[in-house]
Image (cartoon, rainbow, N blue to C red):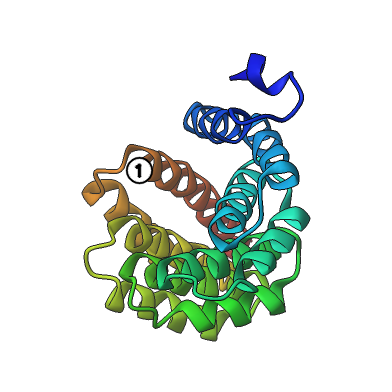
């Protein structure tokens, strides 16, 4: 495919760019995929289908390559097309919300996550509810953050990763409130019950940190 794409754009170039982009993306070579999709966008004929393919590819590969400003741009470009399926619209808003959050634009990302929190796609809704609680925690709106995390747990049945992440987030909220007892209890429950190795490891690390904080706090109280 690279050999074809090294030549002037011809009848075989569009398919070569598409296939090369897909292979690079599947191999987690997101910068490479982005460049292939960019080449496709610049050379492929117009029309909604072609634009949708290139914008969607640029949005997803750009996000995973850490190009958050570009992701927002291509999310908006994708949303500007008419006749997009609901699934494409939902993904575009989600990738934009994620990129806004990672770019430090908490308020705009929060508004987008709220828009998605009641989405018919349960996984998108669960992730969005979690990020709402996450942003509120970062903003030290702890009561609202706790309510939002509990709401995620309550409404996200079947999406274990977001439920477990919400319990871990609750422990962070308890730590901010210096409620080390409930922070420890929450993390101990996660460590005991979750089957997700990565989240179990994260909870174990946080549990050790909370125990150290609790011990330090107890010594200060004794003094």
The residue lying toward the viewer, choosing from 217 and 71, is 71
- Considering the numbered disc 1 on the image, is that residue within a helix, a strand or a loop? helix
Asked whether 82 or 190 is in front, the reply is: 82
Residue 181 at least partly seen: no
Q: What residue is drawn where x is 34% and y is 58%?
A: 164
Could you say where residue 186 lies in the image, as x and y percent from the top left? 35, 61
Where is residue 116 shown, x and y percent of the image?
47, 78
Query: In front here: 168 or 70?
Result: 70
Where the C terminus falls, by quadrant?
A: bottom right
Q: Quadrant of residue 33?
A: top right
Residue hosting label 1: 200
Figure label count? 1
Say which quarter of the image contains residue 16.
top right
Query: Residue at point 43% right, 59% down?
Result: 168
Residue farthest along the top direction in this orientation: 3
Q: Position of residue 62 (x, y in %)?
A: 67, 46
Q: Is residue 127 visible?
A: yes
Q: Residue visible at 69% across and 59% down? A: 74
Position of residue 114 measured from the top left corner of the image (x, y, whole percent): 52, 82
């Amino acid at each position: 495919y690279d050999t074809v794409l090294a030549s002037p754009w011809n009848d075989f170039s569009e398919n070569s760019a598409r296939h090369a982009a897909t292979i690079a993306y599947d191999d987690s070579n997101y910068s490479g995929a982005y460049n292939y999709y960019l080449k496709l966008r610049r050379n492929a004929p117009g029309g909604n289908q072609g634009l949708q393919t290139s914008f969607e590819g640029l949005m997803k590969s750009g996000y995973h390559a850490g190009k958050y400003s570009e992701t927002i741009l291509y999310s908006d470009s994708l949303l500007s097309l008419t006749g997009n399926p609901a699934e494409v619209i939902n993904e575009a808003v989600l990738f934009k919300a994620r990129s806004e959050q990672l770019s430090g634009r908490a308020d705009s990302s929060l508004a987008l996550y709220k828009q998605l929190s009641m989405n018919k796609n349960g996984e998108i809704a669960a992730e969005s509810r979690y990020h709402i609680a996450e942003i509120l925690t970062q903003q030290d709106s702890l009561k609202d953050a706790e309510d939002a995390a509990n709401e995620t747990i309550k409404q996200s049945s079947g999406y274990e990763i977001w439920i477990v992440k919400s319990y871990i987030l609750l422990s962070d909220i308890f730590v901010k409130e210096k409620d080390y007892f409930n922070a420890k209890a929450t993390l101990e429950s996660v460590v005991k019950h979750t089957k997700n190795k990565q989240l179990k490891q994260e909870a174990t690390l946080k549990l050790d940190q909370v125990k150290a904080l609790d011990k330090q706090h107890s010594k200060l109280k004794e003094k």
